[in-house]
Image (tube, coloured by chain):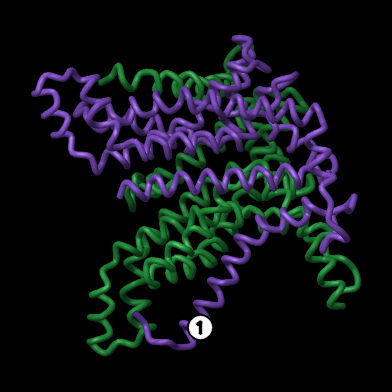
Chain colours: A green, B purple
Amino acid sequence: MLALVSPALLVILALIVLPVGWLAWQSVYHDGFTLENYRRVFTEDVYWRSFALTFEISLAVTVIALLLGYPVAYLANSLPKGWSILILSLVVLPFWTSVLVRAYAWLALLQRTGVINQFLRYLDVISEPLALVHNTFGTVVATVHILLPFMVLPLYAAMQKIPNDLMQAGASLGASPSLTFFRVFLPLSLPGVLAGCTMVFVLCLGFYITPELLGGGRTVMVSMLVSRNVELYNQFGAASAVAVVLLASVLATFFVVSRFISLDRVLGQK
Amino acid sequence: MMRASTARIVLYVVSALVLVYLILPVLIIVPISFSSARFLTFPPPSFSLRWYQLYFSNPAWMQATRVTLTVALLTVAIATPFGVAAAYAISQSKLRIMRLIHMTLLLPLVVPIIITAVGIFFVYAKVGLVATMPGLVLANVMLGLPYVVISVLAGLQSFDPAQEMVARSLGMNRLRSFFAVTLPQIKSSVVAGGIFAFISAMDETIVALFISGGQYQPLTKRMFTALRDEIDPTIAAISALMTAGSFLLVLLATTRQGKKT
């Protein structure tokens, strides 16, 4: 049996475990052992600001995705099968569309001469085009768009497991629909909320393409810090240290979450 | 479940708006790709096929398309058997280390892609795989493996291993019983896993940004650079084609998975 897994395992070990180990090594070793790279990451303003911004954006995206995703998952769960399949297909289709294509679409929609600005000017709602893109706003709108399916699917999966009888029992005991929702349904859907939020938050921490294309160079997320240190400044040690801190944040998030729900639940949804 | 009420109406409206937000950006690509305008305008002043013509007549775009398709096909050809073998072993073996191996195989989904990309770049630089076809394919095999493993494991969950035992007790060896008894029953999840690996390889951008170069640059790398520098409507034509392609493939993959259950 071990022989059967070995080809796949070798590829993973050679192309993800070894490279990450290499990064970790490079972050502390340069002509001798040094913590200089980490000192910079933790004390220099550029790094701090970028980490802070990344956490803020990731939190905002997670909260927005939850607020937008919960009603959709709830509706899909409460409708007959045909309708729920239709809703879930609409959720999943953009998920399998190229991230680049969607970045292009958001540029087309949000830029100064974009669809939304032209439409608003046509309606005379605005006289000057709004700055919707090449800033944090554009980044968040497009990032939520890309990560929303990762929220809806675990929510739907968790809601499916809630027995209908419980809601009927609540109703038969005289509870109003909103009371049964808040006292029975919502608490029971929390594992799905946690799974979805974890996935969205963690993926957002490492986002690269969307902030790079829609952030306009002003929204520098951690992943851009990594690539810039490599591509522009040839600072491999600094890039590695940033990468290690980013990975540590991701693993720490998973660790904290694993104390509440099984990680299979988070990862199994993909 | 709940009687019709204001809450229910709000639910319908909010959900409809969210679905529009999800779908509209994907669909907006199509009219833009058929527009005659040099710059993005909406609605398009008139329709034309000029961006499609530009795409198909540009040798650089065509070369990038060939690289992408080749990489994606080779990725599927390698990742599918590797992933099926691994998923089969994980589902059959009672070794405790298998759980750890299972988690390791899912690492590409967990490690932020930018870290993977930079790490692979460093390793490839040492062994001379930067800007080569084998390097590009190998990286995509790694990224596609989790999709195959997850899909095939899901398929194997509803398969009763006792059937294979029966085949073996009737004299088939392990390999033959797998191909004769197990594989036909999990075929749809194998195909679905392969399709997901294909789409993942078609869409992969970030690793390619670091490790590809010269004549072996995939479409996504050229698109990324083009989008960063200047918005060229040729990208709308490429995007529309890519979107149509992935819609068809996902449809194929999901109907296949649906057939199984």
Which residue is at a point 56% across and 48% down the rendered structure image? B247
Question: In this view of the protein, which residue sits in the foreground, A43 or A246?
Answer: A246
Against B75, is B197 above or below?
Answer: below
The N terminus of chain B lies in which quarter of the figure? bottom left
Residue B96 image point, x, y percent: 22, 28
- Residue positioned most to the left: B169
Against B117, is A10 above or below?
Answer: above
Question: In this view of the protein, which residue sits in the foreground, B219 or A22?
Answer: B219
Residue A48 image point, x, y percent: 66, 43
Residue A27 image point, x, y percent: 59, 23
Question: In this view of the protein, which residue sits in the foreground, B60 or B118?
Answer: B60
Task: Indicate the amino acid at tag 1.
Answer: Ile
Is residue A134 visible in this depiction of the protein? no
Against B95, is A153 above or below?
Answer: below
Against A73, is B2 above or below?
Answer: below
Q: Determine which quarter of the picture holds residue A28.
A: top right
Residue A65 image point, x, y percent: 54, 61
Is residue A137 visible in this depiction of the protein? yes
Residue at label 1? B9
Q: Residues within 10 Å of mark 1 (few under 14, many from 20)?
A: few
- Decide if residue A146 is on the left or right side of residue B152: right
Chain of the residue on which disc 1 is drawn = B
- Decide if residue B223 is on the left or right side of residue A129: left
